[in-house]
Image: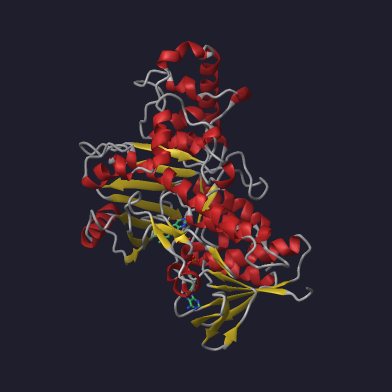
Amino acid sequence: MDRRRSILIVGGGTAGWLTAAYLAKFLEASGQGALTITVLESPEIGIIGVGEATFPTIRTTLQFLGIDEARFIRETSATFKQGIRFTDWARAPTDGRQSHFLHPFEAPLHPDGASLVPYWLLQDERDRAPFAEAVTIQARVAEARRAPKRPHEDAFTGPLSYAYHFDAAKLAALLTRRATSLGVRHLQDQVRQVQLDEHGAISQVVTDANGALEADLYIDCTGFRAELIGRALKARFKPVSRWLFTDRAVTAKVPYAQPDAPLESYTISTAHEAGWIWDIGLNGMRGIGCVYSSRHMSDERAEGVLRSYLGPDAEPVTRRIAFEAGYRERQWIKNCVAVGLSAGFLEPLESTGVVLIEAAAAMIAEFFPHNGPIDAPAARFNELMTARYDNIINFLKLHYCLSQRPEPFWLDNRDPASIPERLAQLLEQWRYRPPSRFDFNLDVETFAFFNYQYILYGMGFRTDLTPGRNDFPNVGAAEKVFARIRAYGERASQDLPGHRELIEQINAEAPLPA
Ligand SMILES: Cc1cc2nc3c(=O)[nH]c(=O)nc-3n(C[C@H](O)[C@H](O)[C@H](O)COP(=O)(O)OP(=O)(O)OC[C@H]3O[C@@H](n4cnc5c(N)ncnc54)[C@H](O)[C@@H]3O)c2cc1C
C-alpha cells in the first residue's frame, strides 16, 4: 500500500498537542515522513488548564521535540522542579509544629555499587539525618532555594535531575506552534457525532464547520469527555476509588505577596484532614489546589481549607474540578487510541498525568502500523498502559497508607482492604529489606525503587535490619560517604545560583528569533 496513512487527533490540550508534536517529530526523525496528522480542537470547550507539575522525563521529551529550553521557560512561565516537599503527611501537626520530608528526583548516591540505605537504616533513629538529606545532595540544594543547574550549562541537563512547573495553557500554545511547524494540520471545530462502521470501528467524525472527517487512526484526546473512546466506543472505565479516595479539587491562582518572594524549586504538598494541597511556584504566580475526597469532606469545607491555607489577604478566584480515579483497560480499540484524561486519571499527587501522555505518545510512535491492520499494536499497548496505571496506583497509595494521621480519611486509607494486594506484599517484604530494583519491571514503571525509598523512609516506615547488622560491616566507609554528601551538599548550596535568580536571568535574555 503506498497511500499515506492519516491520523486525526481530536482534542488540543497537553495530550493532543504533545502527541501530535511527538508523532510528527518521530516520523520526521526516523525518515518515515509519510503520514498526515491533524489536530481538531474546540475553542468553545477549551482545555482543562491544570497540570502544572511534571516529572524529569519531560526534559527528554521537550529536547526530542526540538524545543529550546530557555524559550520553553520564558513562554510557559516555567520554574525548575527538583522534587516534592511533603508537609504533615506522616502525622498531623501538633501545637502548630509541622513535619515534612522531601522526595527529590536525584537517586541516592550509590558509591562503588554499594547501597548506603542499609547503613542509614542501621543508624540511631534519634539523631540521624532525614533520609533524603543523608543520601543525596539535592535535598540541601533544594531547601537552600538553589537551582539544579548553572546558567552556562547545556539545555536540559545539569548537575542535578529536575523537571518543571509551568502554566498548562501556555504549554499547550507552545506545543501548538511546535507541532504546526512540524507539519501538523490544525482545525478549530467541534465534533458533534462519531459514526461507526459495521465492524464497530470509527468510520468518520462529524464536525460543525468541516463536515465529516475520516482517518486511518483516531486519537482521542478530548479529556474527561472521552468523546471517541468512551461515548462512541463504550470502552469500560475501571474506577479505582476503593484504593484512591480523592475525587475533587478546588484550585486557585494567586500572585506572590512581593515580587522577590521565595521561589521554591519543589512542589509543596501539604496534607489536610481529607486530602492534600498542592502549592506550585510559577514565574509570576502561584498555582494552588486543594485535593479532597468528597466522601470525607464537603465542597464548602474544602474551599475553607484552601482559603485558610492562602491566608486572610488572598482573594482568590476558585474553580472546582470533579474527577473519578480510574482508567480504561482498553485504551486502544480498533482504529481509536485514547491519550490523556480520556484514557484515565488517578489524581494529581506525584504529577503522573503528563508522564502517562509522554509514555503513550512514544508507544504510538514506535508501534505505528505503516501498513497492515491498524489495531495490530492494540493488545500490547493496552497491556503496557494498564500495567503502568496499576503500578502508579501502588506508588500513590503508599503515600496515604503509611500516614499516622488520625482523621477518618486517613484511617480509611490504612484499612488493609483499601491497599492493593501487590503493595501489601511489598510492604511486608520491606519490613525486612529496603526496596530493590528487582521489585519492579522498569518497562512498565514510572517510579523506581528509590522513589519508593524516599516515600517509605520519609513517612517513617521501619525496615528492621538489626538482626543481620553484622552483614553490613562497612560502617566506617559508609559514614565517610554520608559526610561527603553533607559537605558536597553545603558546597553546592553555595555554588549553584539561586532559583529565582536563575529564572529571572533566563527571562531577561533576549528571546531567540521565532
Ligand atoms: C485537578 C487536576 C490536577 C492535575 N495536576 C497535574 C499535574 O500537576 N501534573 C500532571 O502531569 N498532570 C496533572 N493533571 C492531569 C493533566 O491536567 C492532564 O493530564 C493534561 O492536562 C492533559 O489533559 P487532556 O489534554 O487530556 O485534556 P484537556 O486539557 O481537557 O483537553 C481536551 C481537549 O479536547 C477538546 N474537545 C473535547 N471535546 C471535543 C469535541 N467534541 N470536539 C472537539 N474538541 C473537543 C477540548 O477543546 C480540548 O482541546 C491534573 C488533572 C487534574 C484534574
Seen at 48% across and 44% down, the residue is 83
Point out residue 460 in the picture as x, y percentages from the top left corner: 35, 31
Residue 447: x and y in percent read: 51, 43
Q: Is residue 507 visible?
A: no
317 or 463: which is nearer to us?
463
**Residue at x 55% of width, y 49% of height:** 502
Foreground of the two, 205 or 167: 205
Q: In this rendering, is residue 105 above or below 361? A: above
The outermost residue toward the front is 198
Tell me if residue 337 comes above or below residue 140 in the rendering. below
The residue at the point 45 percent across, 46 percent down is 266
Picture coordinates of residue 101, whole percent (x, y): 39, 37
Quarter of the image where the C terminus is located: bottom right
When asked about the image quadrant of residue 346, the answer is bottom left
Residue 406 horizontal side relative to residue 135, left or right: left
Q: Residue 309: x percent and y percent?
A: 28, 52
Tell me if residue 168 can be seen.
yes
Q: Is residue 430 above or below residue 40?
A: above
